[in-house]
Image (tube, helix red, strand yellow):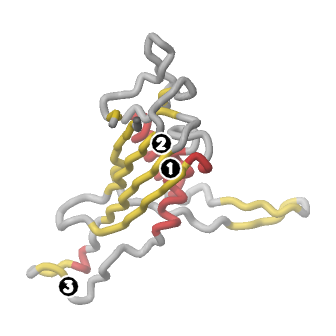
């Protein structure tokens, strides 16, 4: 038996940037600048997962994610799509996934090594639709005693109080 949880993250998906490296006291230090949008995006992903009552587990997890970008206005004409419009959004899908996986660390799973399969797609939204990230997490083998809700809620038997957005299948 498996349990699936689906949630939406509103707003434009943000790819994980390459870290900058500096040296202090003779030691190299890798970092991402404080004002980079990846930090706000990670917070939005974690918040959306918590609001969807996604449980934290130490079991195997399958991650299916769709990164949907708003089509730039330069791609659109009065008659539809411009002939010069790019067929797909620019950021590398693996960099988009890295930022999402980092945000789910400690919220949906304890470690990235628990992800046994990941499926990522990116596309433009239909005309007039906003950008969004659609995430489905499938917990293989269901939820067991090692599971807790992301916000720590538990039912009377000590199990995670998983919300209505998580479906047993």
Q: Quadrant of the N terminus?
A: top left
Residue visible at 49% across and 53% down? Answer: 100
Element marked by disc 2: helix
Which mark sits nearer the N-terminus, 3 or 1?
A: 1
Residue at label 3?
Answer: 82
Residue at label 1?
Answer: 42
Residue visible at 52% across and 56% down? Answer: 99
Q: Nearer the viewer, residue 115 or 121?
A: 115
Image spot of residue 120 (x, y percent): 42, 62
With 70 as the anchor, is 61 left or right in this view? Answer: right
Per the rendering, the mark at residue 98 is none
Residue visible at 46% across and 61% down? Answer: 14
Which mark sits nearer the N-terminus, 2 or 3?
A: 2
Does 54 appear above or below 91?
Answer: above
The reply to whether the C-beta atoms of the residues labelled 3 and 1 are less than 8 Å apart is no
Cα distance between the residues tagged 1 and 2: 6 Å
Q: Residue furthest top?
A: 156
The reply to whether the C-beta atoms of the residues labelled 1 and 2 are less than 8 Å apart is yes
Cα distance between the residues tagged 3 and 1: 33 Å
Q: Residues within 10 Å of mark 3 (few under 14, many from 20)?
A: few
Residue at label 2?
Answer: 46
Image spot of residue 161 (x, y percent): 42, 22
Snapshot quadrant of residue 77: bottom left
């Amino acid at each position: 038996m498996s349990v699936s949880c689906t949630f939406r993250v509103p707003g434009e998906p943000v790819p994980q940037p390459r870290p900058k490296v500096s040296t202090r006291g003779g030691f190299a230090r890798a970092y991402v600048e404080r004002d980079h949008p990846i930090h706000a995006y990670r917070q939005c992903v974690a918040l959306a997962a918590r609001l969807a009552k996604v449980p934290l587990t130490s079991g195997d997890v399958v991650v299916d994610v769709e990164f949907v970008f708003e089509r730039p206005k330069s791609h659109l004409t009065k008659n539809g799509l411009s002939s010069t419009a790019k067929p797909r959004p620019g950021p590398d899908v693996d960099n988009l996934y890295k930022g999402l996986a980092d945000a789910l660390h400690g919220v949906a799973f304890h470690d990235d090594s628990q992800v046994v399969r990941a499926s990522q797609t990116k596309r433009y939204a239909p005309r007039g639709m906003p950008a969004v990230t659609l995430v489905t997490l499938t917990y293989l083998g269901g939820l067991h005693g090692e599971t807790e809700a992301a916000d720590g809620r538990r039912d009377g038997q000590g199990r995670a109080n998983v919300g209505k957005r998580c479906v047993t299948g």
